[in-house]
């Protein structure tokens, strides 16, 4: 199926993570569809990813940006617009489950919100004039933590709850401009960062097996590729009448009856 993303300027925040991360996978899949991926992230890996994509014949750009700094976000959007003349899609993908809980300081809590929520607002605000011109769309990458809680991560949970609220608020606000706004909710995805966390645990393999057993469909974790595929479809014109939606790609982890997991 042609997703009609060829030459679309698609901005992805937090996309210079480890190879195989959700952001990196998104960028790779966008390139395969002929889109122009723009990486907005603070990690210098972005320079390497930009060079690799360009070496494959893909027009790509990395704009090094601290997404907790609103002034840098504004400058990043200006840089993108100056180079390409517009923006077609914004994927707010940055997110760090930083474990900032009730025992932590207010400053730590505010920093968590700055990265995981305020950056979404700022990126969208500064991209909006260009999205209005292109009648583009917004995809916010969310987390099950917004719906289920997790414990010990008040900052991230509050931010991701806010992301879902903004998704529907923007869907309403932007109807007059033909701009769609959706969120993709992730539960357990086996990314390189997740693997690194598992490897820090004394009983890592046991913990991983336990998590997999808690996922109803196939008792396995969602792959970054599956998440990227869902996002690419949702931002494409093949999904042109979908807005204000929370699209959950999680093997049934959040919504299906726990009775499914009872051992026979």
Image (cartoon, rainbow, N blue to C red):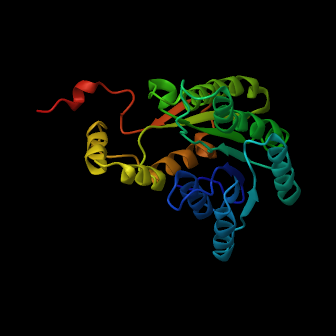
**11 shown above or below 179:** below
**Does residue 52 appear to the left or right of 76 in the view shown?**
left
| Residue at 43%, 37% in the rendered image | 187
| Residue at 72%, 67% in the rendered image | 59
**Does residue 211 appear to the left or right of 90 in the view shown?**
left
Tell me where residue 128 sits by quadrant.
top right
Q: Position of residue 146 (x, y in %)?
A: 52, 27
**203 shown above or below 174:** below
Along the viewing direction, whichever of 133 and 154 lies nearer the viewer? 154
Along the viewing direction, whichever of 34 and 111 lies nearer the viewer? 111
| Residue at 70%, 44% in the rendered image | 90
Along the viewing direction, whichever of 231 and 240 lies nearer the viewer? 231
Q: Kindly give the residue lying farthest to the left in the view shown.
A: 264
**Does residue 204 appear to the left or right of 178 in the view shown?**
left
Q: How many marks?
A: 0
Tell me where residue 154 sits by quadrant.
top right
Q: Kindly give the residue lying farthest to the bottom in the view shown.
A: 55
| Residue at 73%, 61% in the rendered image | 62
Query: Looking at the figure, which quarter contains the C terminus?
Result: top left
Q: Position of residue 185 (x, y in %)?
A: 51, 36
Q: Position of residue 120 (x, y in %)?
A: 70, 37
Q: Position of residue 44 (x, y in %)?
A: 68, 62
């Amino acid at each position: 199926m042609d997703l009609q993303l060829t030459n679309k300027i698609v901005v992805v925040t937090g996309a210079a993570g480890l190879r195989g991360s959700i952001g990196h996978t998104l960028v790779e899949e966008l390139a395969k569809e002929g889109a122009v991926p723009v990486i907005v992230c603070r990690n210098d890996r972005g320079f390497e990813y930009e060079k690799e994509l360009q070496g494959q014949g893909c027009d790509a750009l990395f704009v090094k940006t601290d997404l907790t700094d609103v002034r840098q976000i504004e400058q990043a959007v200006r840089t993108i617009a100056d180079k390409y003349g517009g923006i077609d899609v914004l994927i707010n993908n940055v997110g760090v489950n930083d474990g900032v809980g009730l025992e932590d300081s207010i400053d730590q809590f505010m920093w968590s919100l700055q990265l995981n929520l305020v950056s979404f607002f700022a990126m969208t605000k500064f991209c909006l004039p260009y999205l209005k011109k292109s009648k583009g769309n917004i995809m916010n990458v969310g987390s099950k933590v917004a719906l289920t809680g997790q414990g010990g991560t008040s900052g991230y949970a509050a931010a991701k709850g806010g992301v879902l609220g903004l998704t529907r608020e923007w869907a309403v606000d932007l109807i007059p401009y033909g701009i769609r706004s959706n969120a993709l909710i992730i539960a357990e995805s086996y990314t390189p960062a997740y693997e690194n966390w598992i490897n820090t645990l004394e009983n890592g393999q046991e913990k991983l097996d336990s998590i997999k057993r808690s996922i109803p469909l196939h008792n396995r974790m969602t792959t970054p590729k599956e998440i990227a595929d869902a996002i690419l479809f949702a931002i494409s014109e093949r999904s042109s009448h979908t807005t204000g939606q929370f699209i959950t790609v999680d093997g049934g982890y959040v919504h299906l009856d726990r009775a499914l997991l009872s051992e026979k």
